Amino acid sequence: MGDNDDGDIIEHHVEEEMEKKGSRSHAGSSSFLESVSPSEGEGHSGTQSSHRLLAYSDALISIIATVMILPVAHTKVQDDEELRESVQALLATKIAVYLMTFLIVTVAWAAHIRLFQVVVRIDDCLALLNLACMMLITFLPYTFSLMATFPDNILGILLFCGCVMVIGVIQSLMVLYAFSRPFLLNEQIQISENQTFYKHHILKVIMRVPLMCFLASIASLIVFQLSYALLAIVIFLPYISQFLKWCRSKAMGQVEESPDSMLYYTYLPNEPLSKDRVEAFSDGVYAIVATLLILDICEDNIPDPAVVETQFGGRLIPALLVYGPEYLAYFGSFATVGLLWFVHHSLFLHVTKATRLMGLLNTFSLAFVGGLPLAYQLTHEFPRNSQNELEAIQISCVIIFFAGIFQLAIWVVALYSEQETLHPYVRYGGREHVFMLAKLALYPCVALGTFFLTCILSKFSASIFHLMEITVPFAFLVLRLLVRVGLALLRLIFCPDRPDPRTVVEEEEDETRVPFNTLVTELS
Amino acid sequence: MGDNDDGDIIEHHVEEEMEKKGSRSHAGSSSFLESVSPSEGEGHSGTQSSHRLLAYSDALISIIATVMILPVAHTKVQDDEELRESVQALLATKIAVYLMTFLIVTVAWAAHIRLFQVVVRIDDCLALLNLACMMLITFLPYTFSLMATFPDNILGILLFCGCVMVIGVIQSLMVLYAFSRPFLLNEQIQISENQTFYKHHILKVIMRVPLMCFLASIASLIVFQLSYALLAIVIFLPYISQFLKWCRSKAMGQVEESPDSMLYYTYLPNEPLSKDRVEAFSDGVYAIVATLLILDICEDNIPDPAVVETQFGGRLIPALLVYGPEYLAYFGSFATVGLLWFVHHSLFLHVTKATRLMGLLNTFSLAFVGGLPLAYQLTHEFPRNSQNELEAIQISCVIIFFAGIFQLAIWVVALYSEQETLHPYVRYGGREHVFMLAKLALYPCVALGTFFLTCILSKFSASIFHLMEITVPFAFLVLRLLVRVGLALLRLIFCPDRPDPRTVVEEEEDETRVPFNTLVTELS
């Protein structure tokens, strides 16, 4: 390697560090040349596959989205009040913080996916910029806490807007940096002729949210209520517009998308959401929710040695038996979280492509999964057979029901465009179609059934509820068997002559409702 | 599909659920036939790739290993005592619980890796059994808490041993189940002729730890101190034996391994540890550590509205400025965790195979990374310029130093067998060798330097420490530049005639010490 080469590179590095904003000017050919020079070339040396960076970001984002349930779950509910009132009074703020955090963090996550669909390889500089991004994203929950505690003060909003604007600037820097080194980019863009158009378009999309935050922060100086409205628009805009688009396409038939409107949401029209990253994000949420439970157990359910000495005469087992319901609650909740993950895993195994609507439904499902530690906390907090205990169980059922029903909704939505999104086995009429439906419907049905049981039986207790939670895994073990027995019985009754395709058939378990034409295909 | 087929499968399922232990008897040919029958066949329907199951398990295990630092970090240290004494008195137990949890969980994780090197495809039944395993693993920290709080009571030990034995039974069930369906197994074993030998060998390895726990639980009934010794052996056995083996191989030259002794540690001699899973586990630890910090901020650093009203006349900004050091501590700690991840990421990018010793060093590094929330808590807890504050900074430096030095040790160990473990670029003499050394050495050197600064300068404060932490990323940004400038200067001084290969050359930054023969290779 000659002297000149080295000098050039050093010079270039100075430029890069000192005036990153200026790097737009010398994009294109000069830096592409550099990319094939041996010192900065592709391969292992200068650039790296972004896979692990994305996995780490997914882990960080999913944990930060979920961990804000802890302050909610740790709120002590006073026993003498009515549960419903105390929930309203004490938890509303914290639940609002949790939900806002969850939603805004998923928005940030979606933006992160989009960005790294364009930038497919990274180098050290991009990795460090991404870490700076992550640091600011993890700081967002604090700004929400401020907003929730001091709703009349504009400081929370200003801090939030400031963070979002800085994130936007960092992401723009990353885009500019990547476009100045085209070998970092997606191949589709790398070979495209109008890279400049792409660059400007992507920058425009990225800067939209920071710009709205800028407006919101200015608005907050005048009428601060207005800035909350603007923020709500920022958070929900992608969801609302997606929903409207979906409604329109259902109402008016398949509308041909203009390439521009597609690019507005994603830079890669043929893969709206990366399935891998949806899975990684979901795994993170399920894992942290399952683990938050044991943290509570370890912190709260170790008896004080002095108390054991005085009240139980030094015998540990009776002292621990006092916590019996807590252990039951722990195992019950872990089983629920684990099985919801299991259903999610089974479903996404057969999903070949994730659309944005499916991603949205997945987010809603995960938001309810994140609420499970709250359910755990509530169900073991109240004395046995009180009205509060029943209401706590009902809240748990509602949380589990919604977590499950949104998973089912993902599948239903996927069935609408099953040619693109689903594996043939689980398509309408496929071999595993009925079984998958049974799997997805099990939790919503159990939750609904339990809810009505609590209304009828006043003797229903939290312990029974947790025991039920622990027995659900066995239902999954025998589910395939039950579905098969059901199908065999059906065949005996309705034998070979083809029945009305619209007939809905009852299974052993009421949750496995099978459209009959599927059955016929399966059995023939 | 005919009647008979269905009947067989239902019958088989009954067998499977009711008497799983009996499934050993009909292994081999009969179930292999079944594997090619359409209803249970390979592909998407019955079996699944285990990738996502492993990712989820890694996330769960890494979070459970790290989250036990929270009770440690939340211990309130009394300000009037000396920090060192209060640390000894209050934290020793909790730190012991944290370290024991971390070590035993990593042992369980290593066993999990081994198991899923044999079982490469899963089905629903294996997924559910794995979840049951995970549930028991997450329960282990509670048994440690019991042991630490009641060291004289055997209940904690009995509970722990019970959990480990049940985990062993479940894992044996998984092995038996997988061997009864050979299409789930690793191809190497699938085509091997003596599958029965493999099965018995693997079962023997899996049952070793539960057996020792059984002995420990019996011992605990007689002399409970003995059972602690047995447990310590269980936890450290793999590490100690690995260390002895390594020492022996260094002392006596490369000893030819007998295939038996290799199989004792891993079922796949050519890949002792799965690099992907080491990365996934490390990502989980780094992510949870980074996120625990904001949880503290959100719970503790939101001022009470009443206090703001009375003490600050309703003005929020002065009330928040009180927390200034906390914000600084948060950003400083996040930067440190993020950059330690970054260094880890850079290192493993160039690692092609992870040996067991590298995995062990990685575990030690992660255990110290998990201690960072404690460092964060300590550094902002004490009044400015107190002796306690300096000692808290020193503890932080020690934690960071060891986290970094073990990362460096991974690389050094990898260099010993660089042909197998490292990418050519970073091998001794490779193009990126010096740069990688500089990256890995940066944190230990900064931590060491800061430690000595605190000894010399009594004015050194936590704020300066956190500011230093925040500036380290910029050191990484300019590191490549500095290394290059250093190399250019060296070339000017020692130009083309080849100098003594043993000369050690000083860089701009004292951390980049470069063996000179590397330099020569790089520059020529």
Image (spheres, coloured by chain):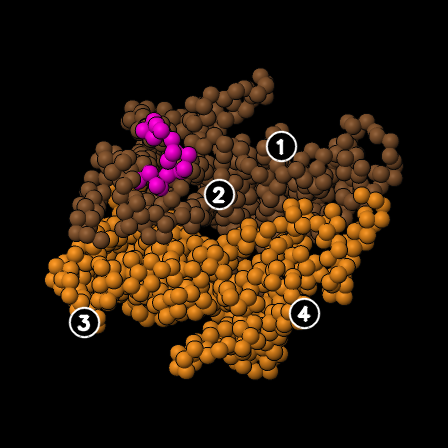
Chain colours: A brown, B orange
Q: How many marks?
A: 4
Placement of A274 over or under B50, stated as above or below: above
CA gap between label 4 and label 1 equals 44 Å
Q: Are marks 4 and 2 in contact (CB under 8 Å)?
A: no
CA gap between label 1 and label 2 equals 21 Å
Q: Are marks 1 and 2 in contact (CB under 8 Å)?
A: no
| Residue B81 position within the rendered picture, expressed as x and y whole percent measured from the top left | 30, 67
Tell me which corner region of the image, top left, top right, bottom left or bottom right, holds residue A490: top right
Residue type, label 4: Asn
Any part of residue B276 in sight? yes
In this rendering, which labeled residue sits more in front, label 3 or label 2?
A: 3
Mark 3 residue element: loop
Q: Chain of mark 3?
A: B
Placement of A511 over or under A67, stated as above or below: above
Tell me which corner region of the image, top left, top right, bottom left or bottom right, holds residue A266: top left
- Observer-nearest of B480 and B469: B480
Q: Chain of mark 4?
A: B
Q: Which residue is mark 3?
A: B500
- Furthest toward the top, the residue is A252
Q: Which residue is mark 2?
A: A277
Residue segment shown in magenta: A181-197
Q: Which residue is mark 1?
A: A418
Question: Does label 3 lie on the same chain as label 4?
Answer: yes
Mark 1 residue element: helix
| Residue A160 position within the rendered picture, expressed as x and y whole percent measured from the top left | 34, 36
Mark 4 residue element: loop
Residue count near mark 4 (Cα–Cα under 10 Å), binned few <14, some 14–19, many ≥20: few
Q: Is residue B308 left or right of residue A307?
A: left
CA gap between label 3 and label 2 equals 52 Å
CA gap between label 4 and label 3 equals 56 Å
